[in-house]
Amino acid sequence: MGMTLVCPAALAQIVANGVAAIQAECDSRGVSFPSLDDPYTPESDDIHRDVYSHIIPVIAAAHQLIATLQYPSMYVMTSAWSMHSATTLRAVVAGNVPEILREAGPQGLHINEIAAKANMNASKLSRVMRLLANEHIFKEIAPDVFTHNRPSSTLDTGHSVEFLVKNPQDKYKAATGMSSLCDMTGDESMKGASYLTETLLDPVTANSDEPHHAAFNRAFNTDLSLFPYYDEPGNEFRLTRFSNCMRNYGFFSRSILDALDWAGLPEGSLVVDVGGGVGTTVLGLSRIHQHLRYVVQDRPATVEQGIRVWENERLDALKAGMVQFQGHDFFEPQPIKDASVFILRAIVHDWSDTYAIKIIRQLREAATSETKLVVVDTIVRYTCSSGKEFEDIPGANISDAPAPLLANYGIGGTSVYQIDLQMMVLVNSLERTLRQFVDVLHAGGWKLEHVSRTEGDQMQHLIASPL
């Protein structure tokens, strides 16, 4: 009997100790940890970063405790039914429910009124809302009366309901928050995921490296891989939604400032952000390190969008020539031969090894002996201990979680495993372990020098030099 209680008791103690530590840190700063009922603002996340090291084990232990205490069959079925979270989130986003409730205010709105504004059936929408409220997304404050809570408020695009009703195709042209990600996940990702089994078992696609052999292709009955598919006539809304999703997900992370000694680079050194989108990373870097020159490379349509963004944000940098945009296909020879730094942010994970190696090989052939390559991506950890496989590479190894937690802190550490499956489903690519990164870099002509990590940042920075 005693043996069966050891694991739950140990897990509960981790939760108790972590919560106590978080409270102590909040008290020392004179702040309160946000509750589920507090409105969300980017600034309200500051305390999360301050106490992140205490948060991880609490989340990991709480989830492991649930897995331990729940009936095994029910625990598995809860995972099997989790697709309803994705579909219901897409439904409320498509119905503009987040914006309707924001305009209603903290007193909330009855489901009949929500449904009327959303042009949906009240009875069915109430069931959708209740599932989400049961998962702490939205709050039911009285029977059939719903309002925002902290998680649900991140779904708000910031537009007025009137604007969204009149301009549905423009919903994601300047939207904030998580709405575009949830909309896309319930669409391309969800539909593609339903064909994952067939894709894994089909001899043609099972061992293929090709981006058009993804589960997405079965779901949408297309031979085009995801990005060319977005460029097809009729997919303008999906393309805009995806661009907004990447813009909001790809916000400037200050952790890149610690990846290299940017200040130590000589005056006028050239930094090239390959596949840099609208230049979000360079936007942050150039504000701090103004002695450098920057080039943002991407597809011509994205370059045009980026220039418009910079004309609003940093017209001075464009006019001064500090920052330039350049149309470029990263599978073609790299035109810049004197770069001090090449950046690949959230690029390598879009491509299987065959194509990732082609991308970084083009950069190697254009690099000088002093050029650095900064790969910004998520490193997949094993759920068990990996020992000291790369102890010769600074920053490569990190400590395992204390027993009885999973070595990688389980879901407390990262959602990388879900993102990994997202990449498999959409473009037949992957998030990589450190071993896989080392091998891909080596095949492309680069040697991993060190790994830069910042606590609380989902992405890491792998710094490589030419072989």
Image (cartoon, rainbow, N blue to C red):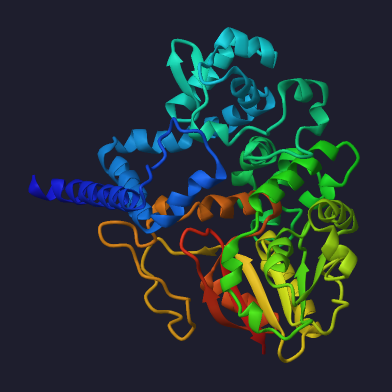
Q: How many marks?
A: 0
* Residue placed furthest toward the left: 2
Q: Quadrant of residue 53?
A: bottom left
**45 or 447, nearer to the observer:** 45
The image shows residue 123 at horizontal and vertical percentages of 56, 9
**161 or 364, nearer to the observer:** 161
* Residue placed furthest toward the front: 30
Q: Is residue 267 visible?
A: yes
* Image: 145 above or below 345: above
- Residue in the image at 56% along x and 32% along y: 153
- Residue in the image at 85% along x and 58% along y: 315
Q: Quadrant of residue 260?
A: bottom right
The image shows residue 248 at horizontal and vertical percentages of 67, 47
Decide if residue 143 is on the left or right side of residue 379.
left
Q: Quadrant of the N terminus?
A: top left
**312 or 15, nearer to the observer:** 312
Decide if residue 139 is on the left or right side of residue 8.
right
Q: Quadrant of residue 460?
A: bottom right
- Residue in the image at 49% along x and 34% along y: 150
The image shows residue 97 at horizontal and vertical percentages of 63, 22
The image shows residue 244 at horizontal and vertical percentages of 73, 44
**94 or 314, nearer to the observer:** 314
